[in-house]
Image (cartoon, rainbow, N blue to C red):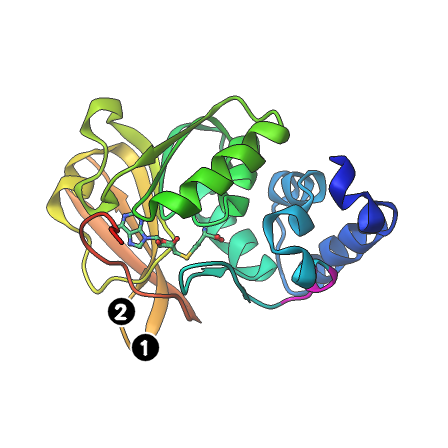
Amino acid sequence: MNSHHSGIGMTSQRTRARMIERLRSQGIADEVVLAAMAAIPRHIFVEEVLANRAYDDVSLPINFGQTISSPFTVARMSELLRAGSILGRVLEIGSGCGYQTAVLAQLAREVYSVERVGPLLTRTRTRLRELRLNNIRLRHADGLLGLSEAAPFDGIMLTAGTPHIPPPLLEQLAVHGKIVFPKGSQDQFLCVIERNLQGYTETIFDEVKFVPMMSGIWKR
Ligand code: SAH
């Protein structure tokens, strides 16, 4: 744990254990996901004034009008992407503060994460480096184009809402791979798209609320 957050460092271990118990009671059953979330200090991903709320079951504002997803949503999306097996190469679109990225890094061999807002990514890069998670590669790019140089991916997770998955992402998904994303713009539902030898299947899950996916990289 890094020193400038040590003020709440002592209690965060216990607070995190309570968060895990709450996730269990909310129906998260994947022990690998729960262990990953028990290992990552969520409070260092939010501004210090919000650190005392980091383990509550809420999404919180980060910068640039974006939000860190609630613990339940992170757990649920991770569980859906993993579906009980070890992930090889994963692509995340929308690094934001990097919390979901850090959780994915415990579940997959390699994580590529793409963020369109440069200054957000700069903070996130520092944070993830401090945690010494070295199977993560961050890119400042428009995730709607995917990341062809690292494809195919066994899993792709979008952390912003979109009514449709752009064709490049479908193409960059490995056969038997999965895409997990918030589908829709007004009303959103978690959606899993699976690729098989015949094509793609789609399954709809819980209702969620995410900021919308935007195209292009952010410029001042
Ligand atoms: N998982 C993040 C979610 C942040 S909110 C977290 O918990 O912090 C969604 C993020 O997606 C924002 O940071 C936003 O800038 C980013 N985003 C939106 N559209 C994007 C795109 N086309 N490519 C890359 N990132 C995008």
Indicate the position of residue 28 as horizontal and vertical percent values: 61, 56
**172 and 121: which one is in front?**
121
- Three-letter code for the amino acid on which mark 1 is drawn: Asp
**163 and 47: which one is in front?**
47
Inspect the magenta stretch and tell me whether residue 41 lies in it.
Answer: no
Dividing the picture into quadrants, the one containing residue 155 is top left
Dividing the picture into quadrants, the one containing residue 148 is top left
Image height check: is 188 above or below 110? below
Image height check: is 109 above or below 208? above
Task: For the C terminus, give its image quadrant.
Answer: bottom left
Inspect the magenta stretch and tell me whether residue 54 lies in it.
Answer: yes
Identify the residue at horizontal 36%, vertical 68% (top origin).
189
Task: For the N terminus, give its image quadrant.
Answer: top right
Dividing the picture into quadrants, the one containing residue 204 is bottom left
Image height check: is 33 above or below 172? below
Q: Is mark 2 within 8 Å of ligand 1?
A: no
Indicate the position of residue 29 as horizontal and vertical percent values: 63, 51
Answer whether labels 1 and 2 touch (C-beta < 8 Å): yes
Indicate the position of residue 127 as horizontal and vertical percent values: 57, 37
Identify the residue at horizontal 68%, vertical 62% (top origin).
49
Identify the residue at horizontal 53%, vertical 21% (top origin).
134
Q: Which residue is mark 2?
A: 184
Dot 1 falls on a residue whose secondary structure is loop
Q: Is mark 1 within 8 Å of ligand 1?
A: no
Dot 2 falls on a residue whose secondary structure is loop
Identify the residue at horizontal 49%, vertical 40% (top origin).
124
Which stretch did the figure color magenta?
Answer: 52-57
Residue sitting at the far left: 167
